[in-house]
Amino acid sequence: MVAGADGKASPAISLVAGGIAGGVESACTYPFEFAKTRVQLYGHEGIRNPFMVVAKVAREEGLRALYKGCSTMIVGSIGKDAVRFVAFDSIRSLFEDPETHRSSTAQSIASGMLTGIVASTLVVTPSERIKTALIDDARTSRRFRSPAHCVATLLSEQGFARALYAGYATTTLKQIGTTGFRLGSYAALKDWERGSTFFRANKIDVDGAAVSFINGAVAGTLTTLATQPFDTVKTKAQQARAVGTLDCVRAVYAEDGIRGFWRGTVMRLGRTVMAGGILFTANEQALRVLKAFFG
C-alpha cells in the first residue's frame, strides 16, 4: 500500500508489512470466515445471524471447531497480503503521475484487479481450496488429520490441478473484484483525504490508526456487496469432493434462486468490515515500525 506522507516503503518492507497485516487480520476474524463457509456449503439452517452461527458451532462442536482450517487461512493470508500489497504498489506505480505520485480512482481499481490475478494464482486459490476442504471435512467424513494430510490426500485422489486449483476461475474473478474494490477504493480514499482541506485544516492524520480502520471498513463493505456471488460459487467448488464450477452455479440457483448467490453475505460482511479495518490499520502501523528500523 501507500506508505504515507514520509515516502513509499521499499518492496521488501511492503512485503513484510503486508504479511504481518494478513496474519493479524485472519487470526482475529476467522470465526466469521468459518461461519460464512458453513452457510455457503450447507445453507442457513434457519440462522442468518453470524454470531448465532458461531455460538451454535461452539456449543455443538466445541470452540476448537471454529478454528478448523485457521492455520491454513493464516499462512495463506500472510502470503496473499504480502504478495498483494507489493504487487499493488508495483502495478499502481506504472499508472501514477510522476510529479504528484497519485493515480485516478479508475487507475487504482485497475491496479487492484491486476493484483488480484497475481494473488489468486500464486497464493489465494490453493490456500482457499485447502481451508474449505478442511471445513467441509469437519462436518462430513472427518478424515483429514491436518492441513498437510488434507493436501496429501487430495493430491493422491484428485491430482494437482483439482487438489489445489479447484474453483480457480471463480476465485480469480472474486480476487479481481475484491482486490480491485478493496485496494482501489482504499487508495482513492487516502488520495482524497491527503488533498482535502478539511483534513489539513483539522490536522487529521490520514495515516493514523483510526482513519485507516474507517477507510478499510468502508472498502471492505463495498468489496463484499460487489463480489459475494463469486465467493459463494467458489466455496461450493472447493468442498472436499471435486465439483465443477457450472455444477455449483446450477446447485446454488436450484436451492435458492438468484438470492442464493448472496448466501453468507451477512457472515462475510461481518468479517470483511472488521477485516478491512484491521488489515489496513495493521499494514499502516507495521509500515511505520519497519520504516523506522530499516527505512
Image (cartoon, rainbow, N blue to C red):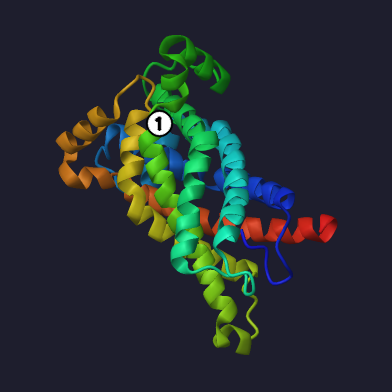
Front in this rendered view, residue 229 or 114: 114
Residue sitting at x 29%, y 30%: 245
Corner quadrant of residue 255: top left
For the N terminus, which image quadrant? bottom right
Q: Residue furthest right?
A: 293
Number of numbered discs on residues: 1
- The residue carrying mark 1 is 60
On the image, the x and y values in percent for residue 3 come to 67, 63
Corner quadrant of residue 129: top left
The reply to whether residue 273 is visible in this rendering is no
Tell me if 268 is positioned left or right of 42 in this view. right
On the image, the x and y values in percent for residue 44 come to 27, 40
Front in this rendered view, residue 49 or 40: 40
The reply to whether residue 97 is visible in this rendering is yes
For the C terminus, which image quadrant? bottom right
Residue sitting at x 51%, y 58%: 183
Tell me if 139 is positioned left or right of 17 in this view. left
Front in this rendered view, residue 170 or 146: 170
On the image, the x and y values in percent for residue 242 come to 34, 20
Tell me if 52 is positioned left or right of 288 in this view. left
Number of residues whose C-alpha sits closer than 10 Å to that of mark 1, classed few (under 14), some (14–19) or many (20 or more): few
Q: Residue furthest top?
A: 156
Residue sitting at x 43%, y 57%: 181
On the image, the x and y values in percent for residue 206 come to 62, 74
Corner quadrant of residue 73: top right
Front in this rendered view, residue 198 or 52: 198
Compared to 92, does 141 lie above or below?
above
Residue sitting at x 62%, y 85%: 200
Kindly identify the amino acid type of the residue bearing the numbered disc 1: Glu
Compared to 115, does 146 lie above or below?
above
Give the SS element for disc 1.
helix
